[in-house]
Image (cartoon, grey):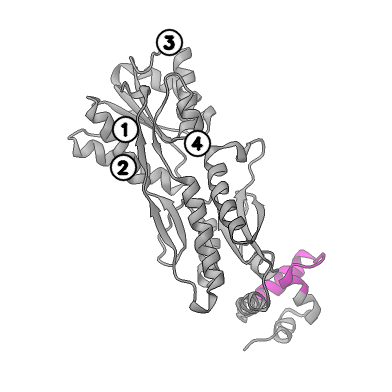
């Protein structure tokens, strides 16, 4: 088995320097850090160091990694607040601590380092995307058999731990409801494409239309970024096609609220001129005018389930780390925005 002395020799540094680099302690020159990490990778030492570090003791913390986006009030969003509420309740019930960690979405995050320095015993990743660098960083967690879970982001890898909602079915049910209301020309305002649930929503939208014998019209598909501002910005494009639309399905409530504000300013009446079906069932959905029909997503339950499963793995670590793969059902909440 490779030892620290061999890593130090290959990197041309002292054993103490190897220890400081791999444990993230003290200031280290970037060139030295890279040299030590490269030597450790060549000798497969880092994996062993992570495993032995985790075996020596526990921090008592469940880590939650969230993206830091300047000027975005992340915790005021329904999505993050509900997930964190479920995670927090599960952690409290089992006597664990909760460590909140921020990552820069534009920089590759070293999730494995959290375990090497014993900051967390397990971690839950929120707001991840399918960009290659993020996928690679998460796959490393699976390859090193560390306890973690990704929330609501699907990856094409059989060993990744994921708790998500069935967004394809939720979108399918919403569009099918609109078709049942007599709508044939149904647009779609979707979220950013780097998230798998955007693709899942698109799949459900197309499936419902095609099953009803309706050919999806690409000119009636719009893209936002799940923010209220992006919904409002889409209003002019939607309004320009108003005579060709019976209804529009929107990827989340925040975009739908922004879209409604923008359309109302342009003189559009809802649901008389346009029916709207949203997604999430946030608290704000019932207070709009008209109140929003929306897909109810069990975010709180998803967060609690992910935390419970991880803490159970820690309590029964001698039984290994079975893959977590949970997909929770959604439901429809029908209100006046669809004319019901």
Q: Which of labels 4 and 1 is toward the front? A: 4
Which residue occupies 68% across, 86% down? 3
Look at mark 1 in the image and give the residue it sits on.
218
Q: Mostly what secondary structure, the magenta segment?
A: helix
Spot occupied by residue 235 in the image (x, y as percentages of width and height): 45, 21
In this rendering, the answer to whether 45 lies above or below 68 is: below
Earlier in the chain: of badge 1 and badge 2, it is 2
Look at mark 2 in the image and give the residue it sits on.
204
Q: CA distance from mark 1 to mark 2?
A: 15 Å
Label pair 3/1, CB-CB below 8 angstroms:
no
Q: CA distance from mark 4 to mark 1?
A: 18 Å
Label pair 4/1, CB-CB below 8 angstroms:
no
How packed mark 4 is, by other alpha carbons closer than 10 Å (few <14, some 14-19, many 20 or more), is some
Where's the N terminus, which quadrant? bottom right
Which stretch is magenta?
Answer: 20-39
Look at mark 3 in the image and give the residue it sits on.
267
Residue 225 got which mark?
A: 4
Q: Is residue 306 magenta?
A: no
SS at mark 2 in the image: helix
Q: CA distance from mark 3 to mark 1?
A: 25 Å
Task: Pick out the residue farthest to the bottom.
Answer: 1
Spot occupied by residue 286 in the image (x, y as percentages of width and height): 45, 27
Which residue occupies 82% across, 64% down? 27
């Amino acid at each position: 088995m490779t030892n620290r002395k061999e890593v130090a020799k290959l990197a041309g540094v002292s054993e103490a320097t190897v220890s400081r680099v791999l444990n993230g302690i003290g200031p280290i020159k970037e060139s030295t850090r890279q040299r030590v990490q490269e030597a450790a990778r060549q000798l497969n030492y880092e994996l062993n160091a992570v495993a032995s570090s985790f075996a020596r003791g526990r921090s008592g913390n469940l880590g939650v990694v969230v993206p830091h986006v300047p000027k975005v009030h992340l915790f005021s969003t329904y999505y993050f607040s509900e997930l964190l509420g479920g995670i927090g309740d599960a952690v409290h019930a089992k006597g664990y601590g909760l460590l909140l960690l921020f990552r820069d979405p534009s920089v590759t995050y070293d999730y494995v380092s959290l375990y090497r320095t014993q900051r967390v015993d397990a971690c839950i990743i929120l707001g991840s995307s399918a960009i290659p660098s993020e996928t690679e960083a998460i796959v490393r967690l699976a390859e090193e058999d560390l306890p973690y879970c990704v929330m609501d982001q699907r990856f094409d890898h059989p060993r990744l731990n994921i708790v998500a909602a069935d967004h394809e079915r939720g979108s399918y049910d919403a569009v099918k409801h609109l078709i049942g209301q007599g709508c044939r020309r149904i647009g779609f305002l979707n979220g950013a494409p780097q998230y798998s649930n955007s693709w899942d929503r698109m799949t459900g939208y197309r499936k419902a239309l095609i099953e009803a014998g309706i050919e999806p019209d690409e000119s009636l598909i719009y893209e936002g970024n799940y923010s209220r501002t992006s919904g409002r910005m889409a209003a002019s494009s939607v309004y320009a096609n108003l005579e060709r639309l019976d209804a529009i399905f929107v990827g989340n409530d925040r975009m739908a609220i922004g879209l409604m504000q923008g359309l109302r300013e342009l003189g559009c009446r809802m649901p008389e001129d346009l029916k709207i079906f949203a997604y999430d069932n946030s608290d704000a959905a019932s207070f709009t005018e008209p109140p929003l029909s929306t897909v109810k997503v069990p975010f709180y339950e998803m967060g609690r389930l992910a935390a419970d499963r991880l803490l159970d793995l820690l309590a029964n670590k001698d039984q290994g780390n079975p893959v977590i793969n949970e997909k929770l059902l959604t439901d429809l909440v029908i209100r006046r925005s669809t004319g019901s």
